[in-house]
Amino acid sequence: MEGFILAAGLGTRLRPETNDKPKALVEVGGITLLERAIRRLEEAGIVHIVVNVHHFADKVTDFIECHQWQAKIDISDERVLLLNTGGGLKHAAPYFSGRENILIHNVDILSDIDLSDVERHHVAAGNLATLCVSQRKTDRPLEFSPDGLLLGRAEKIPSKEQSSYPRYVAFSGISVMSPELLALMTEADHPYSIVDEYIRLSRERQRISYYLHAGTKEHWLDVGKQNTLEQARQLWTASSVK
């Protein structure tokens, strides 16, 4: 499996911390979000990682070059145009081998999800893409069919549907895709969302499904906002967080 870390975002919700550095270099427990993401992928046995850059791109590339990593790391440069999650992945396509599954990980996600198990589930299910999801509050829930296939976005999660099907869940910023998916993606000449691309492909009868994990903040946290970043700094320490 190869890895792709989405680290190009502007980090506007973390200002003023991101006034002079990218979100990827914001620290939790004395360790940057980027290093935490890279180490997590390395722990899953990934030996090749692509990191995309845009905001304070030089600082990200310098950080990567100044550290020793187990994995080989390539930089996908989006200085000219920030391409969002989907366009960024398509832009990075030439760096991947085309033979291995790709784990896509947002840099601002902290979790103890077993990433190797996500890939095992992905392969066993025969999915084109597998999205990590949990049953938690979200403004943009995803809807899956009784047989676990992605249908699209829902307006909200009906409370009575929490434990039934169709399943309404929240995307967790981590997914695994088969290499064949890259060729099916829209060209990277404009910014677009990877989740919207998953929805489009699912509607074209491609098998896009999910991996359900615990949604508690002890096991998963999106630290792209000031309040959740502060939660992380209380919950995680340099010695214990993954």
Image (cartoon, rainbow, N blue to C red):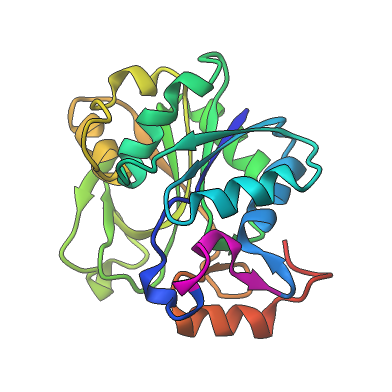
Relative horizontal placement of residue 220, taking residue 6 as reference (left or right): right
The quarter of the rendered structure image containing the C terminus is: bottom right
9 is higher (above) or lower (below) than 150: below
Question: In the visual, does 202 lie left or right of 26?
Answer: left
Q: Is residue 200 above or below residue 236?
A: above
- Residue at x 45% of width, y 73% of height: 19
In the image, farthest residue toward the left = 155
Is any part of residue 189 visible from this angle?
yes
For the residue pair 9 and 1, the one nearer the viewer reads as: 9
Q: Residue furthest right?
A: 239
In which quadrant of the rendered view does residue 148 lie?
top left
Question: Which residue is painted at 37% across and 64% down in the image?
Answer: 163
Residue 202 shown left or right of residue 209 in the figure: left
The quarter holding residue 213 reads bottom right
In the rendering, at what x and y percent does residue 109 appear? Answer: 54, 61
Q: What residue is rendered at 22% in x and 31% in y?
A: 189
Whole-percent x, y for residue 234 in the image:
67, 85
Query: Percent x, y for residue 95?
Result: 52, 22
Q: Is residue 11 left or right of residue 33?
A: left
Q: Above or below — where is 147 with respect to 135?
A: above
On whether residue 140 falls in the magenta region, the answer is: no
Say if 202 sits above or below 229 in the image: above
Q: Position of residue 225 (x, y in %)?
A: 43, 76
Write the start and end of the magenta stretch as one range: 18-28
Q: Specify whether residue 114 is in view.
A: no
Q: Quadrant of the N terminus?
A: top right
Count up the numbered dots. 0
